[in-house]
Image (cartoon, grey):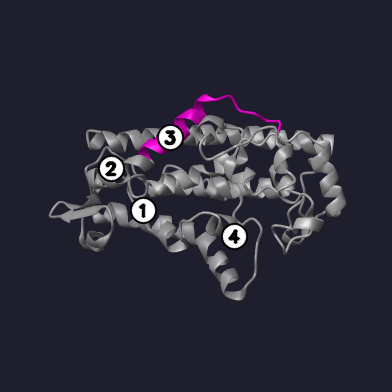
Amino acid sequence: MPTGAEIREGDNGGMPLHHATLSSETEWVPLQEAHQARVRRFTEPYLLRRSTGAKHPVEDFLFTYYNLKPGQLLRWHPGAGVRLAGNAALERAGWKYYTHDGGGAGVDVAAFLRDRQSTVDFTRTILSGTAARPAQYGCFGLHEWAMAYRSELNGVRHEYLELRLGAKGTDGVVEGEKIRCTHFDAFRFYAPEAAPLNELTPTRENQRHLEQPGCLHANMDLYKWAYKLTPLLSSGIVLNCFELSWRIRAMDMRASPYDLTRWGLAPIRIELPEGKAEYVREQRAFAMESQELRRRLLAELEQAVDLAGG
């Protein structure tokens, strides 16, 4: 698993997007190769595990929960406003939302907006609304505990993992804490008996009003909103969101009720005061990092839309 320092390599995606109208083959092919090498550090171990039936509670998540396939993540896109010259760009003539002519290959922004305007609008709403709200830091990752509540009756969602406090210990934590999850896509996996214990009732309809920047899952979902706008956005920012989500997922599972010691992951013991403090420290750091990336996503999206006059 790459470390945080390794993950942040190449943060700018390699190209000053929306400034140059044409990129020569000698300029953009090395960027494509660097992107693919960066992606393979994540995809190759996953594909090997999948071929053998092995599982990893952190490293498989972004390929199983989210819809983007490893091969799709491997494709490099310069983003709207950049045309790629040279013979290597010819294959993009058959790629969706690309055009190719004598001036090179580039993203067909108008076609993308014509087909995906509702996605663009919803993404704008979610990102801008979340960015504008104050972060909340009192959840302590109890969504994963609520999913494992009454496991003796409902079973464990991750059947290959063991509960480090056992079933009764896990239930005791859920019953002894205030649970205030704001994220629908976490809440919807709660055990039936745990849902009424949540102070809020997140739904798909009120999602745009509840998302807030302290939520680990809202910050992991930056990756989802970024890849849904592919190839309008650059692969650099999509992969930055992927790598952030990867690191957040590790924290999320360390704070969960599961015993992950066989994968070398020490628990954040949120059932104890010192564990809660550790959780909030890491949560605050991720919130700050995510807010900056959220702003960059919005800025790149607006630049792309401006190119089509929309």
Where does residue 206 sit, x and y in percent of width and height? Answer: 53, 34
Which of the 4 image quarters holds residue 15?
Answer: top left
Residue type, label 1: Leu
Report how far apart the C-alphas of labels 1 and 2 lie in the structure.
Answer: 26 Å
Distance in Å between CA atoms under marks 4 and 2: 32 Å
Query: Looking at numbered disc 2 in the image, what kind of residue is underneath it?
Result: Leu
Give the residue drawn at x 82%, y 40%.
Answer: 175
Secondary structure type for disc 1:
helix
Nearer the observer: mark 2 or 3; the answer is 2
Residue type, mark 4 in image: Asp
First to last magenta residue range:
120-138
Q: Can you give x and y, in whole percent of width and height, for residue 295 in the image? A: 45, 32
Tell me if 142 is positioned left or right of 176 in this view: left
- Whether residue 283 is situated above or below residue 235 in the rendered picture: above
Left/right of residue 265 with respect to residue 231 in the rendered view: right
Q: Using the numbered discs, state the Cα–Cα distance from disc 3 to disc 1 in whole angstroms.
A: 20 Å
Residue 113 got which mark?
2
> Looking at the image, which is closer to me, 266 or 308?
308
- Mark seen at residue 296: 3
Q: Secondary structure at mark 3?
A: helix
**Image quarter of residue 196:** top right
Give the tally of numbered discs.
Answer: 4
Decide whether residue 122 is among the magenta residues.
yes
Q: Nearer the viewer, residue 198 or 41?
A: 198
Kindly identify which numbered label has been placed on residue 60. 4
Instruction: Kindly identify which residue carries mark 1.
Output: 31
Q: Label 2, label 3: how many angstroms apart (C-alpha)?
A: 19 Å
